Image (spheres, helix red, strand yellow):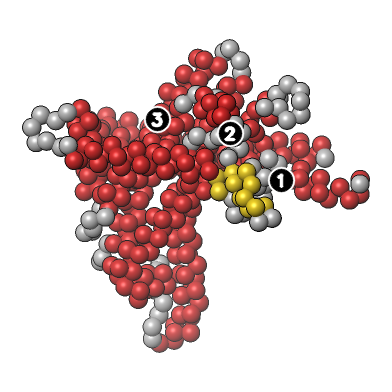
Amino acid sequence: MEMVISYTALAVAFMIGMGALGVGIGMGLLGGRFLEGAARQPELAPMLQTKMFIVVALLDAVAMIGVGIALLFAFANPFVDQLRNALAPVAG
Amino acid sequence: MASDGGPLTPGDYITHHLQNLQVCQVDGEWAWNQCAGNPMTINVDSMFFSMLLGLFFIWTFGKAARMATSGTPGKLQAFVEIIVDFVDSIVKDSFHGKSRLIAPLALTVFVWVFLMNLMDLIPVDWLPMAAGAVGIPYLKVVPTTDINVTFGMSISVFTLIIFYTIKTKGVGGFLREMTMQPIAPPTRGAGLIAAPFIIGFNLILESVALLAKPLSMSLRLFGNLFAGELIFILIAIVGIWQLPLHLGWAVFHLLIVTLQAFIFMMLTIAYLSLATEEH
């Protein structure tokens, strides 16, 4: 039982961390390109900013789906229930 | 609120705040909050708040439209005009077909999702405590943190996508779009033997792309709002130091709330534009 819980905790950390890592790198690149483009042609900056926010929200999506699943495991771990159901006939 | 009789643990607080007010049929009788695992439950709090906010939106914007004057506008009319102009400019930029439905649909999606997300900025305990005083045990006030609400909206948009595809291109065009892209199957000669495999391959790819649209739309909105709400709950556990943290997170969450509503609207317009475009 402890192994299931500890591995789940590690998995939750991985899911949130790797998602954040990828999104961090991606947003950094995106923001850098936006600043370059805005520095080149300042009159396009508002339009570029709108498009940048669209891509930011699309990037967020994948990370958030990972966070959602990770939080599901953190608070309502299905593996613990599965283990409990499997052990119950033996214990009871 | 503690079911075990002892002091309320942080885990109990969190799971209490993440629980919807549910009604379902247990052995033929309608019962409240005994619905774990029952697929035919209704989340009454999500339904109530989403309908309340929808009706509020329609009533406010309808009132502004009825009382619209071409003279100096009042504040409500000016505000509604700003939002309608904003959505109108986006639809004109992104939608390349002819439809009278798209702009009102985009306006509804944007303002309704924005209002539902905005409920997340109400302090976590206020409405559930008020409801608890009246005898309602659980209350989740943000409808978009309920995955049923977001999937409901995205499945409606998905239905509209298929409807508009068939209306613009016909059923034959829809099937052609699913089977002849991205690899055009050979129609004569020796390559004809490979045509069924290519059609099957295309069908798998295009089906995945088509199904990914509503799935990603709803999960994006749900994931962002659920994570935001959970962080509000976690900050509320901290104690007296929660006030500056709440303020900081609320300011950031305001950006997320608006951005997610805007993205939902943009994707609706973009997908419907793809569905109605003709070569």
- Pair 2/3: label in front: 2
Per the model, the C-alpha gap separating discs 1 and 3 is: 33 Å
Residue B262 appears in the rendering: no
Quick one: quadrant of the N terminus of chain B? top right
Residue B65 percent across, percent down from the top left:
20, 40
The mark nearer the N terminus, 2 or 3, is: 2
Instruction: Determine the CA span between mark 2 and mark 1.
Output: 28 Å
Please provide percent x and percent y for residue B54: 37, 42
Pointer 2: what residue? Answer: B136
Q: Is residue B218 visible?
A: yes
Q: Amino acid at mark 1?
A: Pro
Front label number (2 vs 1): 2
Q: Secondary structure at mark 2?
A: loop
Displayed quadrant of residue B20: top right
Q: Chain of mark 3?
A: B
Q: Determine whether the residue tagged by mark 1 lies in a helix, strand or loop.
A: helix
Q: Residue at x 62, y 21 (%)?
A: B237
According to the image, label 3 marks what residue?
Answer: B255
* In the foreground, A6 or B117: B117
Chain letter belonging to callout 2:
B
Label 3 sits on what residue type? Leu
Question: In this figure, which residue is indicated by the disc labeled 1?
Answer: A78
- Amino acid under disc 2: Ile
Is mark 2 in CB contact (under 8 Å) with mark 1? no
Q: Is residue B135 left or right of residue B107?
A: right
